[in-house]
Image: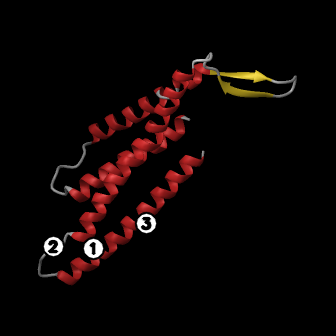
Amino acid sequence: MVAVFLSAYTLVAMSFDRYIVIVHPFRPRITTRKTLCVIIIIWILSLSIPIPTLIKSKVQYYSNTSGQCLETWDNNHTLMYAYSTGIMVLHFFGPLVVLIFCYSRIGYNIWKKTLHGNDENKRRLQLASAKQKVSTTIIESSQMTSNLRIS
């Protein structure tokens, strides 16, 4: 479960960095120190969110040879549903909203905004190349997100 959160939050951090670089190109780039802080925060979140699963999981044996690892919530269904909903939001919906926001703004910036200048053909080729890269990134991110949902 930790690896799934690490993957999702790393994708969020990467998409947010790309958003800043493309949509706000004149803002200063993120420093090495800030990057290290983001990495540490991602690891802390990814390690701490699944702690209740670690605490509540028990192996229940059905025979001498087979058992199943289940979460035991001691008939506290409200707490179980609250935790499951929180996991769903933190693992899927939260990162999905950030990815959709970042890549839709990036796409808008690349496709809709036009820059006027003397080398318009050169600029068009650069924009076409950027469009192709963003399309590939969006497709790869959606495939990764769907793979994360399956596991």
Q: Are marks 2 and 1 in contact (CB under 8 Å)?
A: no
Q: Residue at coordinates 25% horizontally, 43% vertically from top-left?
A: 31
Tell me if residue 6 can be seen: yes
> In the rendered view, does 98 fall on the left or right side of 89?
left
> In the rendered view, does 119 fall on the left or right side of 145?
left
Residue 47 x, y percent position in the rendering: 48, 29
The disc label shown at residue 38, or none: none
Local secondary structure at mark 1: helix
Q: Residues within 10 Å of mark 2 (few under 14, many from 20)?
A: few
Disc tally is 3
Q: What is the distance, in whole Å, between disc 3 and disc 2 at their CAs?
A: 23 Å
- Say which label, 1 or 3, has the lower sequence index: 1
In this view, 2 is above or below 62: below
Q: Which residue is farthest bottom?
A: 121
Q: Residues within 10 Å of mark 3 (few under 14, many from 20)?
A: few
In this view, 87 is above or below 51: below
Local secondary structure at mark 2: loop
Q: What is the distance, in whole Å, between disc 2 and disc 1 at their CAs?
A: 10 Å
Q: Quadrant of residue 42?
A: top left
Q: What is the distance, in whole Å, between disc 1 and disc 3 at their CAs?
A: 14 Å
Q: Quadrant of the N terminus?
A: top right
Residue identified by numbered label 1: 127
Q: Amino acid at mark 1?
A: Leu
Q: Amino acid at mark 3?
A: Thr
Residue 149 x, y percent position in the rendering: 55, 47
Local secondary structure at mark 3: helix
Q: Residue at coordinates 32% horizontally, 52% vertically from top-left?
A: 101
Residue identified by numbered label 2: 115
- Say which label, 3 or 2, has the lower sequence index: 2
The disc label shown at residue 136, or none: 3
Q: Are marks 3 and 2 in contact (CB under 8 Å)?
A: no
